[in-house]
Image (cartoon, rainbow, N blue to C red):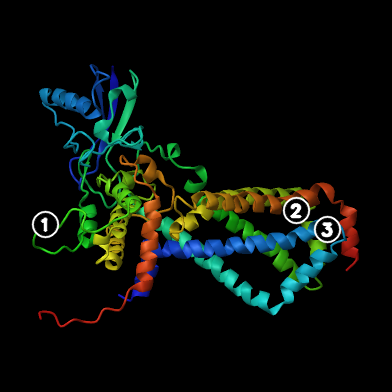
């Protein structure tokens, strides 16, 4: 068999694809967060609108966007395949199985947290990519954010999804390095420390935005911004 | 002590199993778990019933024969012991304990609590060996090996091949077992000849046997009676990646010569 085919089909190979795409998606999260934090600048959305305009028009970003979509697809497909095969590996289930005693919740539930994050992703893209790129006379990006987060349910959904993303990365970040063979006794502690950035700081950073807009950004500002287009 | 046992009984791989309940009423807390089962079996034989089949041999935690999922934990609730090293003082008078075989597609049940672990032997046959020259016995320390390397290889070599890692893993993955074997030989100079081929062949055999994929839960490490670390799994992954990068296309050799 062709060596590359064998690699892709092997258990370790599939997981190496999962870990590489996972880390790529982590880097995307970091960039996305830094851009989003311009929302907190008290300038009526000028900085965020400029960032949003740059992201939707810059050629290099558009090319990276294709890579991002592919990254998501490979990560999701490999994840589902691994999950499905793992279900087949134990046809008779245990009557009593105390996996809880030995493993963290985040590690046992990546398929659950990942699926909810995927649902979140679809809703998120529908609101913001749909609302800005596939609409006639789109509002300013800032106005769209302000109006979306004026809904309590919508904002709460974001916060819940981000908490689950945090759990997903709590497992995923360290697991990616383990799968790539880069985790050992010397660097394990350092990787765990960097991991905190991804599973704790990044989700908190994102979650600040719906909370801030829902509680501290009054509707008249949003209306003004809407009127300002 | 009085212990109630909920035991998986299964005639053979083809038949479907079921749980049966037995009460052991005169259990000493100093008994090992297997001695307690011996007493239960003696009573079953006296009553004209089929004794509970379970694997065991050395009964001192070195052979890797025994292995029962006891109360939902491979080798029972204690760390770093095999089933034979578990004592009844771990449990309380009146406890009900569920006993199940290692459950994995790659480990079909032979009878009751015994499973067929030859899938692991076939993984070893695929690549878990080294080439040696025949002839006189070589000098013990003829090949220098740094102490920390020897120590790490020894930690991996502690694996007794009991299969608890597979039993404990939510995915029935044999990664810790395969990692221990690959890691041990990849670390030592004697293992270099087959280094590249070994990891490719052993991972291939592991996948073909129907073991699941590792999902980095580390339940294996927690249940391993020899405390084999998951850092060996990282080394296996690294070895696998390396082997795929450095492997040369093999020319068809004429053979014979």
Q: Which quadrant of the rendered structure holds the C terminus of chain B?
A: bottom left
Q: Is residue B28 visible?
A: yes
**Observer-nearest residue: B135 or B118?**
B135
Does residue A142 appear to the left or right of B250 in the view shown?
right
Indicate whether B226 appears above or below B130.
Answer: above
Q: Which of the 4 quarters of the picture holds residue B76?
A: top left
Does residue A84 appear to the left or right of B248 in the view shown?
right
Q: Position of residue B166 (x, y in %)?
A: 32, 48
Q: Chain of mark 2?
A: A
Q: Earlier in the sequence, mark 2 or mark 3?
A: 3
User: Quick check: marks 2 and 1 in contact, CB under 8 Å?
Assistant: no
CA distance separating discs 2 and 3: 12 Å
| Label 2: element kind | helix
Q: Which residue is mark 1?
A: B137
Identify the residue at horizontal 74%, vertical 60% (top origin). A36
* Label 2 Cα crowd, 10 Å radius (few <14 / some 14-19 / many 20+): many
Q: Position of residue B122 (x, y in %)?
A: 21, 57
Identify the residue at horizontal 58%, vertical 72% (top origin). A67
Q: Which residue is mark 2?
A: A209
| Label 3: element kind | loop
Q: Is residue A92 visible?
A: no
* Label 1 Cα crowd, 10 Å radius (few <14 / some 14-19 / many 20+): few
Q: Which residue is mark 3?
A: A41
**Observer-nearest residue: B178 or A164?**
B178
Does residue B142 appear to the left or right of A89 in the view shown?
left
Q: Chain of mark 3?
A: A
Q: Position of residue B97 (x, y in %)?
A: 32, 28
């Amino acid at each position: 068999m062709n060596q590359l085919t064998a690699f892709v089909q092997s258990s370790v190979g599939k997981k190496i694809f999962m870990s590489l795409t996972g880390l790529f998606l982590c880097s995307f999260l970091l960039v996305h967060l830094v851009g989003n934090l311009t929302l907190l600048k008290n300038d009526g959305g000028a900085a965020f609108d400029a960032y949003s305009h740059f992201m939707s028009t810059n050629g290099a970003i558009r090319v990276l966007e294709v890579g991002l979509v592919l990254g998501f697809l490979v990560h999701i497909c490999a994840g589902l395949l691994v999950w499905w095969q793992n279900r087949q590996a134990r046809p008779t289930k245990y009557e009593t199985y105390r996996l809880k005693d030995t493993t963290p919740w985040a590690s046992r539930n990546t398929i659950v947290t990942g699926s909810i994050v995927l649902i979140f992703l679809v809703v998120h893209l529908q609101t913001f990519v749909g609302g800005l790129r596939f609409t006639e006379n789109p509002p300013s990006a800032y106005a769209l954010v302000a109006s979306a987060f004026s809904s309590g349910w919508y904002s709460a959904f974001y916060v819940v999804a981000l908490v689950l993303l945090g759990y997903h990365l709590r497992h995923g970040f360290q697991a990616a390095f383990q799968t790539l063979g880069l985790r050992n006794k010397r660097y394990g502690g350092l990787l765990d420390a960097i991991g905190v950035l991804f599973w704790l700081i990044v989700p908190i950073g994102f979650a600040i935005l719906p909370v801030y807009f829902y509680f501290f950004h009054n509707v008249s500002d949003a209306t003004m911004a809407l009127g300002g287009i | 002590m009085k212990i109630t046992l909920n035991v998986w009984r299964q005639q053979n791989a083809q038949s479907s199993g079921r749980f049966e309940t037995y009460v052991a009423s005169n259990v000493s807390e100093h008994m090992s778990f297997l001695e307690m089962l011996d007493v239960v079996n003696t009573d079953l034989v006296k009553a004209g019933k089929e004794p509970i089949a379970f694997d065991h041999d050395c009964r001192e935690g070195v052979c890797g024969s025994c292995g029962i999922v006891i109360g939902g934990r491979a080798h029972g609730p204690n760390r770093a012991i095999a089933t034979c090293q578990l004592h009844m003082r771990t449990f309380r008078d009146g406890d009900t304990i569920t006993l199940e075989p290692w459950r994995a597609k790659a480990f079909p049940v032979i009878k009751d609590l015994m499973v067929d672990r030859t899938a692991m032997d076939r993984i070893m046959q695929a690549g878990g060996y080294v080439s040696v020259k025949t002839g006189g016995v070589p000098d013990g320390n003829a090949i220098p090996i740094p102490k920390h390397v020897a120590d790490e290889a020894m930690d991996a070599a502690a694996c007794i091949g009991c299969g608890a890692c597979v039993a404990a893993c939510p995915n029935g993955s044999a990664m810790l077992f395969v990692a221990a074997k690959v890691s041990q030989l990849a670390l030592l100079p004697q293992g270099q000849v087959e280094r590249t081929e070994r990891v490719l062949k052993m991972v291939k055999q592991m996948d073909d046997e129907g073991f699941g994929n590792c999902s980095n839960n580390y339940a294996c490490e927690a249940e391993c009676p020899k405390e084999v670390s998951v850092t060996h799994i990282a080394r296996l992954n690294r070895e696998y990646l390396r082997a795929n990068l450095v492997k040369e296309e093999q020319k068809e050799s004429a053979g014979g010569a």
